[in-house]
């Protein structure tokens, strides 16, 4: 699968995922770009994948974690989650619903939150 096909297929979902994970649309854009740089390096591997979507999201996840490690140093990555960004995964909610969704997401473990985000992406 070519990079432009990956972007067309999953670019918007990756951006929503990264926005929720990073707490900033600007940071999400930067990390999305880094994700595609990394994917370009994996051109040979991409042809052999059974599940390209899982690989692409795994790369984005790893790039987001690299971003947080650079930004936060040794601080806990859990603390970086911002529940007020629930609108990044579900668009069109009214504010009270968005707040409730953010609170519900905040109560989940990081793995559970990512599963919800990936399911909605």
Image (cartoon, rainbow, N blue to C red):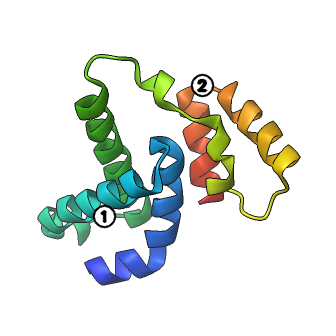
Q: Residue 28, position in %: x, y? A: 40, 55
Image quarter (top left, top right, bottom left or bottom right) of the C terminus: bottom right
Q: Mark 1 points at which residue?
A: 49
Residue at image point 37% right, 51% down: 27
Q: Name the residue under label 2.
A: 109
Q: CA gap, disc 1 to disc 2?
A: 29 Å
Under circle 2, the secondary element is loop
Total labels: the figure holds 2
Q: Residue 101, position in %: x, y? A: 77, 41
- Tell which of 75 and 109 is nearer to you: 75
Residue at image point 31% right, 43% down: 62
**Residue 75 in sight:** yes
- Tell which of 99 and 51 is nearer to you: 99
> Which of the two discs, 1 and 2, sits closer to the camera?
2
- Tell which of 6 and 103 is nearer to you: 103
Please tell me the numbered disc located at residue 15. Answer: none
**Left or right: where 25 falls relative to 120:** left
Residue at image point 66% right, 29% down: 106
Q: Residue 79, position in %: x, y? A: 49, 22
Q: Residue 41, position in %: x, y? A: 12, 63
**Left or right: where 49 falls relative to 94:** left
- Tell which of 1 and 59 is nearer to you: 59
Crowd tier of the residue under label 1, counting other residues whose Cα lies within 10 Å: few below 14, some 14–19, many 20 or above: few
Crowd tier of the residue under label 2, counting other residues whose Cα lies within 10 Å: few below 14, some 14–19, many 20 or above: few
**Left or right: where 91 falls relative to 115:** right
Image quarter (top left, top right, bottom left or bottom right) of the N terminus: bottom left
Residue at image point 43% right, 81% down: 8
* Residue 71, quarter of picture: top left
In the rendered view, would you say 85 is above or below 48? above
Under circle 1, the secondary element is loop
């Amino acid at each position: 699968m070519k990079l432009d096909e990956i972007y067309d297929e999953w670019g918007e979902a990756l951006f929503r995922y990264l926005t929720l994970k990073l707490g900033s649309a600007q940071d999400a854009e930067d990390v999305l770009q880094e994700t595609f740089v990394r994917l370009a390096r994996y051109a040979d591997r991409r042809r052999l994948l059974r599940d390209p979507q899982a690989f692409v999201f795994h790369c984005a996840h790893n790039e987001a974690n690299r971003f947080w490690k650079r930004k936060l140093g040794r601080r806990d990555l859990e603390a970086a989650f911002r529940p007020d960004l629930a609108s990044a995964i579900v668009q069109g909610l009214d504010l009270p619903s968005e707040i409730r969704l953010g609170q519900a997401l905040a109560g989940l473990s990081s793995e559970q939150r990512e599963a919800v985000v990936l399911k909605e992406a």
